[in-house]
Structure formats: structure tokens, C-alpha cells
Image (spheres, rainbow, N blue to C red):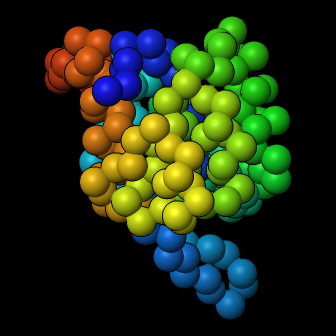
Amino acid sequence: MQDLTKIKAFTFDVDGVFTDGGILCDTAGELYRTYNAKDGFAVRMATWHGYPVGIITGGRSKSIPARFATCGITEADIYLHSRIKSEDFMTFCKSHDLSPDEVMFIGDDLPDIEVLQICGLSVCPSDAADEVKAVCDIVSDYPGGNGCVRKAVESVLKAQGKWVFDSVQYKKFF
């Protein structure tokens, strides 16, 4: 069993993690993703309780920072068009004075492997690439876009006694 109490921050890929990997495209080239609200709520719980949260994605759409702003993630912690994700992961760690072993990362495909190998807790959805599953500490019971993020974040917060909801305080934060 992994020590969930050592995690001080969360980082995520987007497509295939927060989404099921499907992307719609209009004739102007704008990409559309569908996100799971419960995954987003778990991220809100993390930011509300003071955890730094980062997004490291190859995606470039302006809709990505807009989506994650609603979860309390600052634009400075959103790394779009990431080609060497381990570099952006280390930048995130440095900007929050964190050791990589204090940070969880959830990824699902080959560009995520380097980060999964250096982070403190590596997690992937149940439908991740086989190569990703082989390097992860935890393979979720849930697929991307369908509760993988929620389960991982909730597990860490519960292990640390921080999965606590107070609607009055929540309203003040969001």
C-alpha cells in the first residue's frame, strides 16, 4: 500500500485522465472536451484545502485554463503544449518548493511516462496504455473521464483527514 500521507500536491494530464480521450473538433479547428463534474469537484476540494495543483498537457486549447480556473487552479500552474512533461513537472515542483516525491501525477499515455517515473505517487486510469500501467504505483479501477481523478484525490485527502466539506467555507472560496 502506498503512503498517501506524504503527498502535498497534485498534477495531471488532461486528455484521457479528466476526459475519456474523445475530442470533438469544429470546422474552425476548435477542440471540445467533456469533463466529469465529480473529478472537478475533487480538484476543488484539493485547492480549497491548500494543495498546489498543476495541469501538464500537450493540449493547447484556451478552454483548458478556463475549465481548470473553475477548480481553483491558477494559470501559472497550467502547462499547455507540453512536449517534455518532466521539465514542466520539475518547474511546478520548484515553483511550490516541493520535492518530486511529494507530488502525485496522473497520466494515461506514453508522453506521461517520464513524469510517472519521477513523481512520488504515480496513478493512471484503468484504460491507460499498457506501458503506462507497467510503471504506475496505482492503476485506478476507473477509466479516464469517469472518476479516476476523483478516486485518487479523494483517497489522498481522506488519508490526511482533509476530505471535509463545509458549505459556508466552500462558498467563500468558490
Q: Position of residue 111 (x, y in %)?
A: 71, 56
Q: Nearer the viewer, residue 126 or 14?
A: 126
Task: Report the label total.
Answer: 0
Q: Position of residue 26 (x, y in %)?
A: 62, 86
Q: Is residue 120 visible?
A: yes
Residue at the image position 23 percent from the left and 21 percent from the top:
158
Residue 168: image quadrant is top left
Q: Nearer the viewer, residue 148 or 77?
A: 148
Residue 108: image quadrant is bottom right
Q: Quadrant of the C terminus?
A: top left
| Residue 89, above or below 157 | below
Q: Is residue 134 left or right of residue 80?
A: left
Residue at the image position 50 percent from the left and 44 percent from the top:
136
Q: Is residue 16 left or right of residue 49?
A: right
Residue furthest to the bottom: 27
Residue at the image position 46 percent from the left and 50 percent from the top:
124
Residue 45: image quadrant is top left
